[in-house]
Image (spheres, coloured by chain):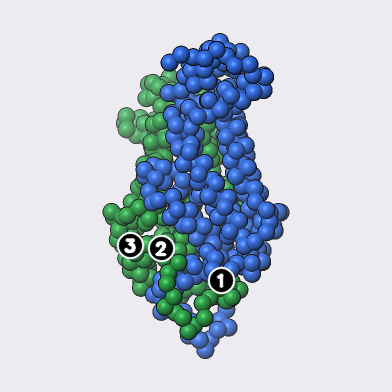
Chain colours: A blue, B green
Amino acid sequence: MTVPAYRRLSVEQRRSQLIDAALDLFAHRLPEEVSLDGVAAAAGVSRPLVYRYFPGGKQQLYEAALRSAADELERCFAEPQTGPLTERLARALRRYLRFVDEHDTGFMALLQGGSVVETSRTNAIVDEVRRTAADHILVHLEAPEPGARLRLMVRTWITAVEGASLIWLDEGKQPPVEELHGWLLDHFVALLTVTAAGDPETAAAARRALVLERPDGPVAALTQRLLPVVADAAHLALPPESPESPES
Amino acid sequence: MTVPAYRRLSVEQRRSQLIDAALDLFAHRLPEEVSLDGVAAAAGVSRPLVYRYFPGGKQQLYEAALRSAADELERCFAEPQTGPLTERLARALRRYLRFVDEHDTGFMALLQGGSVVETSRTNAIVDEVRRTAADHILVHLEAPEPGARLRLMVRTWITAVEGASLIWLDEGKQPPVEELHGWLLDHFVALLTVTAAGDPETAAAARRALVLERPDGPVAALTQRLLPVVADAAHLALPPESPESPES
């Protein structure tokens, strides 16, 4: 393949082009399989030119690519504060899962740890993405400064989404992404509900969210699908004549 | 402090003693803060003796301590297959959280990644613990060879427990461990229930588990606490005259 003569690009454009080429390679290969020569070839430039922009070599290029991916991910989370909460969350989650699907190998290498390019800086970037995701959800729950239980709930669900995404990649992208998406949303509703059952702040947030839900929305659909499962628990319900039993 | 003369120990006893001393140090300090001198002092032996047993130095000692901790953790998960599922899970989870509490700094350093002693071997040990935990739960669910949805559910809950434990340590062990324990159990019940709502295999497993639950057990208590939350969702229920509506 003939490498075309360098196009005239500004410093910023060239830098972006190199980062895009690196991100594309790091997304689908293990970090140890990506070389500066490979990035240079993908960008149609010479290896010395890559070094001129990234004198720290592969590690610096990896961190720049990760920074760029983190910015892209954080943009996924942005949603206007209108409409039912589950529909806002469904849109953000769909964008997130598309990102996971498109950056599969790199996503796994990054999050499974032990990678050759992992440093305290790369871990800090990943943690920042998690914190940003949590902050977004808490804004939508109208609880920007939550107590311990609600914060734990939101952070744990984010961990679960990340873990489920890794498991999904590890299982050859099974079940289909639409099922994974619906199940993660159900998981959020379930976790919010059981946390609300023990924490007044979460209960208030759940109540605010529930009134916005539509009769044809995901919560209503989940409720319908839950009925036969819950019917099997009838032997656990208190008899109707003692509804005022103390909390346990 | 006078170091006592070496006690006469067999090779296996000495090795165990050194691993116990190392594990105790690695549990409460960052790996970079643990030195061979420190392990030697804690075990009351000389540094050359530590090297005789662990010629690979700190890394080898760390891996041996991690192996020992992993064995201890895997023993936490063992439970006879009798009684309600939530009570079996509650006991295993209590032992797990005690382990987390007792190995706090080491647990965080190990799982947050980027540690100086992290290698593909240490990651493999951690993955083995996760796999063992999942296998135990699937045996209790009487589904040792599960389909994609049930396997994803169990593996995701384990990820969530691990993530919540890290968050709990990060938040200065708040909320109190008993609350964390009850909430993680509620999380399991909720996740099993919503997964059952969309997957026949999980529904069958949930049904088998539910019939064993007691009216004074955790599922019944959760159900009672859920009533006021669910009452807020009344506007989402289909009218009673159309219970045969198609699934959505």
Measured in 3D between alpha carbons, the distance from the residue under mark 3 to the one under mark 2, in whole angstroms, is 9 Å
Residue visible at 49% across and 14% down in the picture: A3
Instruction: Name the kind of residue labelled 1 in the image.
Output: Pro
Q: Position of residue B32 (x, y in %)?
A: 55, 28
Secondary structure at numbered mark 3: helix
Q: Position of residue A173 (x, y in %)?
A: 39, 45
Q: Which residue is mark 1?
A: A215
Q: Is residue A246 left or right of residue A140?
A: left
Q: Position of residue B131 (x, y in %)?
A: 36, 46
Q: Which residue is mark 3?
A: B201
Subunit ID for the residue under disc 2: B
Q: Is residue A67 above or below residue A86?
A: above
Residue visible at 46% across and 48% down in the picture: A164
Instruction: Name the kind of residue labelled 2 in the image.
Output: Gly
Measured in 3D between alpha carbons, the distance from the residue under mark 3 to the one under mark 1, in whole angstroms, is 28 Å
Q: Is residue A183 left or right of residue A69?
A: left
Viewer-proximal residue among B69 and A224: A224
Evaluate whether label 1 is on the same chain as label 2.
no
Tell me the tag on residue B198: 2
Measured in 3D between alpha carbons, the distance from the residue under mark 1 to the one under mark 2, in whole angstroms, is 19 Å
Instruction: Name the kind of residue labelled 3 in the image.
Output: Glu
